[in-house]
Amino acid sequence: MTQQPQAKYRKDYKAPDFTITHLDLDFDLQASHTQVIAKSRVKQQVIGSDSMFLDGDGLSLKRVEINGEAWPHFEETPEGLVLTQLPTEFELLIETHIDPAANSSLEGLYLSDGAYCTQCEAEGFRRITYYLDRPDVLAKFTTKIAADKSAFPFLLSNGNKVGSGELESGRHWVQWEDPYAKPSYLFALVAGDFDRLADSFTTRSGRDVALEIFVDKGNLDRATHAMTSLKNSMKWDEDRFDLEYDLDIYMIVAVDFFNMGAMENKGLNVFNSKYVLANSDTATDTDYLGIEAVIGHEYFHNWTGNRVTCRDWFQLSLKEGLTVFRDQEFSSDLGSRAVNRIGNVRTMRGPQFAEDRSPMAHPIRPDKVIEMNNFYTLTVYEKGSEVIRMMHTLLGEVKFQKGIKLYFERHDGTAATCEDFVKAMEDASGIDLKQFRLWYSQSGTPVLDVTSVYDDESNTLTLRVKQHTPSTADQKDKQPLMIPFDVELYASDGNVIELQCNGEVVSNVLHVAESEQTFVFDNVGEQPVISMLREFSAPVTLHYAYSDEELAFLMVHARNEFARWDAGQMLLAKHIKANVIRVQAGEAVHIPEEVVDAFRGVLLSDQLDAALIAEVMQLPSENEIGGWFDVVDVDAINAVRGATKQHFANELADEFSAIYHSLKQMEYSIAHDAIGQRSLRNMCLAYLALTEQGDDIVSAHYTDSNNMTDTAAALAAANHAELASRAALMQAFSDKWQHDGLVMDKWFMLQGGNPAQGALDNVKAQMSHPAFSLKNPNRTRSLVGAFCNNNPVNFHAKDGAGYEFLSDILIQLNESNPQVASRLIDPLLKFKRFDQDRQALMRDQLERLALLDNLAKDLYEKINKALEV
Ligand code: B3K
Ligand code: ZN
C-alpha cells in the first residue's frame, strides 16, 4: 500500500462550501468505454470560498468546462479533482470515461451478466463521475442514456421517463427526470434486455402508480410474489405509517451479481435476484418471507432514507435502523408476530452480540470510519432497529406515530441526523429521552443481573436490578443506559398478578436507568414466577437464577408466545452450558428427564401454533452458544449440541413421528398457517433423521416433495445427520438444478456447512462445480461463507487449514471484490475468543493478509483493528 488509508471522524462534520442543485447526466454506454458527461449547477455556500474538491475514483478525465468554457484551474489527485478560482455560481461540465466491463467490485457502473447496472451507496457514484459524493448534497437529476437497441432495449433511471429516440447504428436513447432532489448515492441506471412484469397500485389519494419488475428473460413466473409484496408494502405504509408513494412509477430490477440484498434508489430499486425470484419449485418458505421483507424494506426507504436522508454516513442508522424497524413491523403485521420476533432476537443474541465482542465493535452511530461499506453492520441495522423499538415501547404506538409525523414535518426533503429523529420523538411525546440518547453513542451489550426477594409477611416482591456494559474494543468506559425492562408476574395457577407500587397499578415496562436499582411491588399474594425482558424489550443479556421448574412453568403459562419460547431457550441454555463444562471435564452429557418433559409438553400442546412449536424445538446455534463463554470451545460446544439434539430425538421419537405423520404434505401455499405446518413437519424430520428410520424417512421426504421447502429440508436433514443417503440426494439435486445458480446456493450452503470430517476438501472441490464462481457474491457467500460461519468444527480445525483456506480466498477477493472480501473476513477477526493455539493460527493469517501490498481499505480497516493491541 502506497499511502495508509485515513479515518474520518463524526466530530469533524462540516457542511460543504459549495453545493450542487441540479445535475444532468448523459451516458453513452459501451462495455469497456462508457462516456459520462455530467453538467452540474453549482452554488457557493460559504462566502469567500473559491475552491471545491470533487470525489472521484478510477475515472479517466476528458474535459472540464465552466459556463461553457474550458476551465484550466483544476488538479487531479488520487482521490478526486480540485477545482480552483471558482465563481460563486456556475455551470460545471465534466466528461469522464469509465470501463464497466472491467468493474468486478460491483460498485459504480458495472455489467451483470450482460446488463448494465449501478450501485452507488455508500460512495460508488464517484466511480461514475467527479462529484460532491456525500449525502448532504441534494440535487435534481436528469439522466440521458444511449445504448445499442437490440442488446439493451430497456434504458432505465430514476424518476419519470421524459423522452426517447433513435440514433444511428442501431442505437437509441431514453431520458429520465427525477422531480425529487436526492443525494448521489440514490442515483441508479440500468440497461438491458429483460422480461417485465407490470401492474399498478392506486394510492389512497387516488393516484395510479405503475409498478414494473424486470427480471432475466424466462423468469417472469418467478416475479409474482415480489409484485404482491410490493403492493402489500405500499398499502401497509399508508395504513400504519400514513405514508403514500410520491412518483408515478416504481421499478425493481433483479440482477444476479450484487454485493448486498437490494438498493433503494429513488423510483428504481436494484435487487439481488435472490430477493425477487421465487416459485414453489425453486424457493423455500424462508425465501418467500425474505422477499417480502426486503421488498418492504426498500419500499419503506422511500420515506425513511430518500425523502429524509442522512446528513453524513455516521448517521446511517437514522435510515437503516428505522427502516429495519418498519420492515419488521410489516412482516409481523402480515404474518406471525411471535415468529418474527424470535428470528430478530436470534440475530441479536447470536451475530450482533458477537459483533459487540469483536474488534469491530461500534455504537449504532459510529464515531470513526475508514471504509463506509464496513459499517453496514448488524449493529447499525439490527441493534439500530432495537433502539427504535425501545422508543416505540417507551412512547407507545400513538405517540411514536406523532413523533414520526413531526419528524417528516421538520425534515422532509433534507439530510438529517439521528439527533433530529430523537428530538422529534421527544418533542411530539413530551417524554424525556436525554439518557436514552446514550444508546446512539455507547457500544456493547449491556448485562442485567437481576435478583428477587419475596416477603410473604408484607406480600411484597423486590426486584434488584444491576446493569453494567462490559468494555468493548472501541470504548473502555461505559455509563448506565435507560433500559425498558418488561416484566410480568404469575401466580402458581398461571394467573397474572398485576404489578402494583404503593397500591397503584403500574406499567409492565420498568425504567432501569441506574447501575443499581430496586423495584418493590406490593399486594403480591404468593411467591410469583417472574417473566422478564418480555418481547426482548431491550438488546441486553439477562442474568437471573431461574430454576428449571420456573422455566418449565413459563413455557406453559407465560401469556405471550415470545416469552414461552424464551423460557424454553433459557432452559436449554442452562443445561447446554452446564454440559459444556461437564464435557470439558471429561464427563458425559446429562439432560434431566424433567427438561425433556417440558419440551414434550410443548410438542403435545394444543394451544401453541405449529410455527411456534417448531421454533421452541430449535436449539440455539453453536455460534450463539459460543457467546455464553469467555473462551469458545468449538469441539465441546459441537459435542454438547449434537448430544442434546440426539437425546431429544431418542426420547421424543414417538412424538416427532406422530406429529410428522399427522401433517401430510399439502398442495403448496404460502399462507402463514401452511408455512407453520411445513416448518413443524420439517423440524420433526430433522430429529427423526437422527433415529434408526432416518435414511428411509428422509429419502421418502425428498422423493415425495412437491416444493423446494420440503426438498431443501430433506437435504439439510441428511446433511446434518450425516446419513448414508446424503451423497445420492445431493447428487440428484445438483443434476436437476445445476443450471440455476440461485437454487444451487442452497446446495452450496449445505456443502459449506457439512459437519462431517474432511468437509474442507469437499468445499475446495466444489469450487470447480460448473455452477460455482468466485465472481458471484451469492455463490461465494453460500459456499465459502457457510463454511466459515456455519461450520465451526471444520473452520476451526486444529491444524489451521480452515483459516488458511479463508485467507487464500480473501487474497483473490481483495483484488476483485473488496466488499465481499470484507464481509467474509469477520470470523477470522474474532480470534481472541478462542484458545491460544487457534488464536496464533488465526493471527498468522491476518498478518499474512496485512502484508499484501495492494490491501483494499475495506480489509485494511478490519485487519488493523483486529491486530491492534
Ligand atoms: N441501503 C442499501 C445498502 C447499501 C450497502 C452499501 N455497501 C440497502 C438497504 O439497506 O436497504
Ligand atoms: Zn436499508
Image: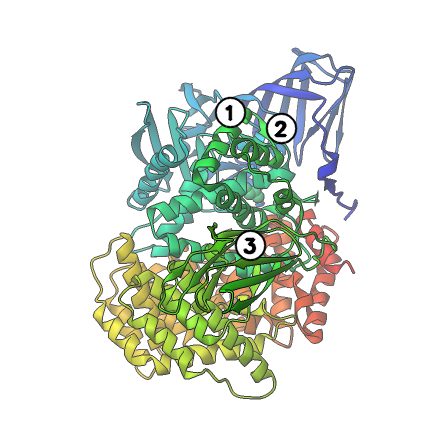
Residue carrying label 1: 409
User: CA–CA distance between discs 1 and 2?
Assistant: 18 Å
Looking at the picture, tell me which residue is in the foreground, 142 or 676: 676
Element at badge 3?
Answer: loop
| Colour scheme employed for the rendering of this structure | rainbow
- Residue 612 location in percent, x, y? 35, 62
**At 43% across and 61% down in the image, what residue appears?**
563
Report the side of 764 relative to 169 (left or right).
right
Choose mark 2 or mark 3, whichever is in front.
3
The residue that appears at 58% across and 50% down in the rendered structure is 379
Q: Secondary structure at mark 1?
A: helix
**Residue drawn 64% across the image and 48% down it:** 363
Residue 136 marker:
2
Mark 3 residue's CB less than 8 Å from ligand 2: no
Q: Nearer the viewer, mark 1 or mark 2?
A: 1
Query: Please, what is the three-letter code of the amino acid marked with disc 2?
Result: Asp
Query: Where does residue 354 sit, x and y in percent of width and height?
Result: 60, 60
Distance from disc 2 to disc 3, alpha carbons, whole Å, reads 31 Å
Label 1 to label 3, Cα distance in Å? 30 Å
Q: If you read the primary sequence from the N terminus, does the residue marked by circle 1 or circle 3 appear first?
A: 1
At horizontal 51% and vertical 65% (from top left) the residue drawn is 458
For the residue marked with disc 3, what is the amino acid?
Pro
Res 272 visible:
no
Residue receiving disc 3: 539
